[in-house]
Image (tube, coloured by chain):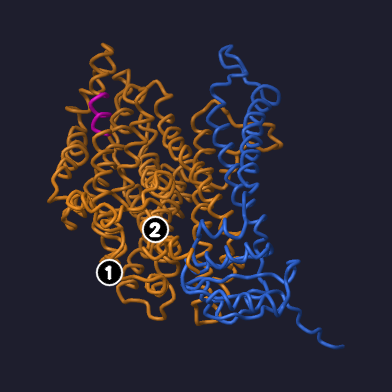
Chain colours: A orange, B blue
């Protein structure tokens, strides 16, 4: 953990440090006890806030709609969706990519910002990781159901079978199976490992026997031993080091699903970095969308401070610019390639039947984030909230543009077609949003939504005072 | 049948600040105690050094896990695509190694991450529902805001009276015997 220089150590630099001093990552006056009690009490409280029931109830209704949709889908088949020939990939792949992308910010915050020693990640990493897990769960539903026979989905894995078949390892779709299942597993491990010391805290704080037993089981007998902490810290760092290349690889592999095909609009070498930046962009937007109401309703403004929101806004601006560069390069390469089909692809995007999607995308993803250059915008919580939602919509539109407008008119005009999502496409999409929110509501009710033990480490009194230690 | 008398597991001292527990651990190490442990609400690097923990085998295990994952991942694809189920796609080579990289990479990460987590739990001896130290009164605060230093009875230098007196000289909040 990096230490801010104390003012009294450098009196001649007092003016400069005053200018450079960053706003704190935690409000003043907290102790180990008060941080612990404040976060743990949200999970352990007997009284569930009324607002929670309203929010969870609404989300639960959407989950029921999702279950109904899935039941009908399995009964009738994927024909109830809008997919057709030539647009064989519609909402299912679109929403898969959208959800996976949202998940990426969680891993970025928990792993990459840990390696970069960004202390401010501490209060947002836990629920960002939860967000990752739930987003990956929603994402996983789409390819699973798109197979048409989800009960045979295990055929995607290589295993000895009586059909004597093996998956095609040269296909990006199989790479996807490995990438996404590894990503889900590693994210779950990272999340659970981070939770173990906090489970121990909840076990020790819980009043009810049932809560004590359940948290106790989950804590696995954690007792905060120095030997354990030593291995724990090593593991956490190693997992961060492993998750960092993993998160980059996952969206790279997702972009290969498109880039390896020969379709104009998909077949581009810029896809991997452009997809990864887009994933982080949308993920941070989603973290912001969730963090702003959470800190308000649970009074966590001292833990998730304005500095957190500003930093996230800056990351959104940076990744938004990378994404804008990606759009520019797509247009540039279409012209520079001097290829009729490539040229037509971009012309069709801008002026074809889906022109409004393309320009709405530019409005949401390229123009809106430019407001983040302004200090005043970065300091205004309601404006940040609105921008984060616009970016979420923009990233959905981006995948719509990439998938639908590339597929609907490819090479031969005789095989062109049109696509639009049906009622069932929308009910499934909105249903997964419900599933995501319902899981999040359960998470904030029963688990500590901020990492308690890591919050203790960023308190000023957590540092060992060497001068004092020598006196004893 | 007689209930066996509880045996002494060690002596534990309770402190209020991280500085106090680190100073106490350093003193105990200087005194010659080696079988020690400390219990704190968050990881303290100085404390790890103070009680004489030098390194852990974990990084090596994770490296081995990663290598095994890579070999298994690549081997699986080679076996499936070249030996078990060769598929002639326009005369292209069966051993198309660049296409095998993504899955090899993912398997490397997967096995390494599993090794890291399971290895950490195994080396720490978790899950372990019972441990004598949980008998310490007020130990539930070790997961909140109190810091504990334990000297085990197995330490060669341990003497129930002397060690207790030594612990009392460290300005602790309280010193108690931990029974097994």
Which residue is pictured at 49% across the width and 30% down the height? A172
Residue A291 higher or lower than A350, as above or below = below
Secondary element under disc 2, as helix, strand or loop, is helix
**Residue farthest to the bottom?**
B2
Q: Position of residue B85 (x, y in %)?
A: 67, 25
Which residue is pictured at 54% across the width and 38% down the height? A178
Q: Residues within 10 Å of mark 1 (few under 14, many from 20)?
A: few
Q: Position of residue A104 (x, y in %)?
A: 39, 44
Q: Residues within 10 Å of mark 2 (few under 14, many from 20)?
A: many
**Viewer-proximal residue among A378 and A365:** A378
Quarter of the image that includes the C terminus of chain B: bottom right
**Viewer-proximal residue among A424 and A368:** A368
For marks 1 and 2, the one nearer the N-term is: 2
Distance from Cα at disc 1 to Cα at disc 2: 15 Å
Quadrant in which residue B1 is drawn: bottom right
The disc placed on residue A127 is: 2
**Residue farthest to the front?**
A471
The disc placed on residue A6 is: none
Which residue is pictured at 37% across the width and 74% down the height? A34
* Residue annotated with mark 1: A297
In the image, the segment drawn in magenta is: A323-330
**Viewer-proximal residue among A116 and A460:** A460
**Is A468 on the left or on the right of A389, as rendered?**
right
**Residue farthest to the right?**
B1
Q: Is residue B104 among what the camera can see?
A: yes
**Is A400 on the left or on the right of A383, as rendered?**
right
Q: Tags 1 and 2 in contact by the CB under 8 Å rule?
A: no
Which residue is pictured at 57% across the width and 45% down the height? B113
Identify the subunit bearing mark 1.
A
Magenta span has B5? no
On the same chain, marks 1 and 2? The answer is yes
């Amino acid at each position: 953990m990096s230490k801010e220089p104390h003012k009294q150590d450098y009196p001649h630099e007092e003016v400069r440090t005053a200018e450079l001093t960053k706003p704190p990552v935690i409000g003043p006056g907290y102790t180990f006890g008060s941080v612990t009690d404040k976060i743990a009490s949200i999970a352990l409280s007997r009284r569930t806030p009324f607002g929670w029931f309203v929010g969870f109830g609404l989300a639960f209704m959407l989950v029921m709609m999702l279950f109904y949709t899935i039941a009908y889908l399995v009964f009738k088949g994927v024909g109830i969706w809008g997919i057709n020939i030539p647009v064989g990939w519609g909402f299912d792949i679109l929403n898969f990519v959208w959800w996976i992308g949202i998940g990426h910010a969680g891993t970025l915050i928990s792993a990459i910002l840990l390696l970069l020693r960004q202390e401010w990640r501490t209060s947002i990493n836990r629920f960002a990781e939860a967000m990752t897990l739930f987003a990956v769960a929603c994402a996983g539903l789409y390819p699973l159901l798109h197979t048409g026979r989800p009960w045979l989905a295990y055929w995607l894995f290589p295993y000895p079978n009586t059909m004597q078949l093996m998956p095609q390892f040269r296909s990006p779709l199989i790479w996807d199976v490995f990438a996404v299942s590894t990503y889900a597993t590693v994210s779950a491990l990272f999340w659970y490992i981070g939770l173990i010391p906090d489970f121990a805290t909840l076990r020790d704080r819980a009043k009810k026997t049932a809560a004590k037993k359940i948290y106790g089981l989950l804590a696995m007998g954690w007792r905060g031993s120095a030997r354990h902490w030593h291995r724990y810290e090593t593991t956490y760092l190693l997992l961060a080091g492993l998750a960092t290349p993993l998160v980059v690889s996952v969206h790279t592999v997702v972009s290969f699903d498109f880039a390896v095909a020969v379709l104009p609009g998909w077949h581009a070498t810029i896809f991997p970095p452009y997809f990864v930046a887009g994933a982080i962009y949308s993920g941070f937007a989603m973290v912001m969308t969730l963090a702003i109401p959470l800190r308000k309703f649970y009074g966590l403004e001292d833990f998730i401070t304005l500095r957190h929101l500003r930093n996230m806004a800056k990351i959104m601006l940076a990744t938004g610019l990378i994404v804008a560069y990606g759009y520019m390069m797509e247009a540039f390469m279409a012209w520079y390639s001097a290829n009729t089909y490539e040229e037509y692809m971009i012309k069709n995007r801008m002026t074809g039947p889906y022109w409004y999607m393309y320009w709405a995308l530019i409005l949401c993803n390229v123009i809106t984030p430019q407001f983040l250059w302004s200090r005043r915008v970065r300091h205004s919580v309601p404006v940040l909230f609105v921008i984060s939602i616009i970016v979420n919509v923009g990233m959905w539109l981006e995948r719509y543009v990439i998938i639908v407008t590339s597929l609907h008119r490819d090479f031969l005009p005789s095989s062109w077609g049109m696509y639009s999502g049906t009622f069932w496409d929308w009910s499934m999409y909105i249903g997964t949003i419900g599933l995501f929110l319902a899981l999040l509501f359960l998470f904030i009710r029963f688990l500590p939504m901020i990492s308690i033990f890591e919050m203790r480490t960023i308190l000023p009194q957590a540092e060992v005072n060497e001068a004092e230690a020598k006196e004893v | 049948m007689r209930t066996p008398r509880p045996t002494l597991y060690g002596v534990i001292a309770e402190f209020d600040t991280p500085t106090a527990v680190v100073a106490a651990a350093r003193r105990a190490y200087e005194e010659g105690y080696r079988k020690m442990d400390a219990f704190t609400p968050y990881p303290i690097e100085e404390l790890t050094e103070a009680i004489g923990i030098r390194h852990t085998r974990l990084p090596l295990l994770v490296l081995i896990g990663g290598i095994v994952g890579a070999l298994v991942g690549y081997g699986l694809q080679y076996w499936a695509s070249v030996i078990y189920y060769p598929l002639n796609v326009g005369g292209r080579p069966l051993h198309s190694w660049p296409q095998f990289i993504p899955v090899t990479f993912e398997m490397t990460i997967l096995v390494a991450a599993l090794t890291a987590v399971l290895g950490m739990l195994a080396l720490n001896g978790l899950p372990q529902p019972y441990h004598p130290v949980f008998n310490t009164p007020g130990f539930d605060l070790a997961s909140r805001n109190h810091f504990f230093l334990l000297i085990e009875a197995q330490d060669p230098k341990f003497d129930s009276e002397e060690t207790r007196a030594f612990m009392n000289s460290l300005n602790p909040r309280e010193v108690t015997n931990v029974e097994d």
